[in-house]
Amino acid sequence: SIDVIDNYPGLISLSVNDNSFDGDVPQSLWNNKNMQVIDLENNAFTGAISINVGQMVGLQTLRLAGNDFTGAIPAQLGNLDNLRLVTLEGNNFDAGSFVPEAVCIRNPFIVVTIDTSISCPGRCCTVVAV
């Protein structure tokens, strides 16, 4: 479990990709405004991406591909001026989920990877095979 991150409130980078972590991501991760890099790719995380992600003002990289995230992609991602890479493909987001247009508008150099189940109104998205 990555619940141990509660013991590290000053954490700025978390990379636990390609492990067997599962369950919901601890709310304390989404509440950490110091975080710059979150790499949770290729695990079995579930639940929704918290709307608190929009308060992570220093976040530059958000890698969530290859999990079992559900729900909608939060509009609050569009609040993040420093975001440069987001990977969302290979999850179970709600039908009709889309990348908020503000993500592409606020961050002209951002790269967002998605699969065909996610739509993207901006030009910042790249569809990748899952």
Image: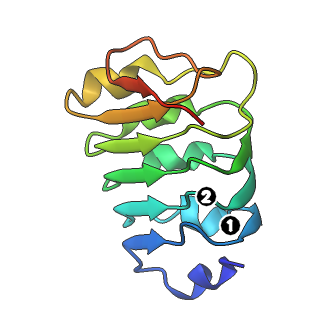
The C terminus, quarter of image:
top right
Left or right side of 37 for 100: right
Q: Residue 108's quadrant in the figure?
A: top left
Q: Earlier in the sequence, mark 1 or mark 2?
A: 1
Q: How far is the residue under mark 1 from the one under mark 2?
A: 17 Å
Left or right side of 97 for 92: right
Name, please, the residue furthest toward the top.
121
Image point (31%, 44%), residue name:
83
Mark 2, other Cα within 10 Å: few <14 / some 14–19 / many ≥20: many
Q: Does any portion of residue 34 appear in the rendered image?
A: yes
Q: Does any portion of residue 56 appear in the rendered image?
A: no
The N terminus, quarter of image:
bottom right
Return the x and y of residue 122 as percentages of the image width and height. 37, 14
Q: How many marks?
A: 2
Q: Secondary structure at mark 1?
A: loop
Residue type at mark 2: give it.
Asn
Image point (54%, 72%), residue name:
16
Q: Nearer the viewer, mark 1 or mark 2?
A: 2
Name, please, the residue furthest toward the front.
129
Left or right side of 88 for 47: right
Q: Which mark is residue 42?
A: 2
Q: Residue 91's quadrant in the figure?
A: top right
Residue type at mark 1: give it.
Pro
Task: Say which of 117 and 58 sits in front.
Answer: 117
Q: Which mark is residue 73?
A: none
Image point (26%, 46%), residue name:
82
Return the x and y of residue 23 as percentages of the image width and height. 79, 63
Image point (39%, 24%), residue name:
125
Residue denoted by label 1 = 26
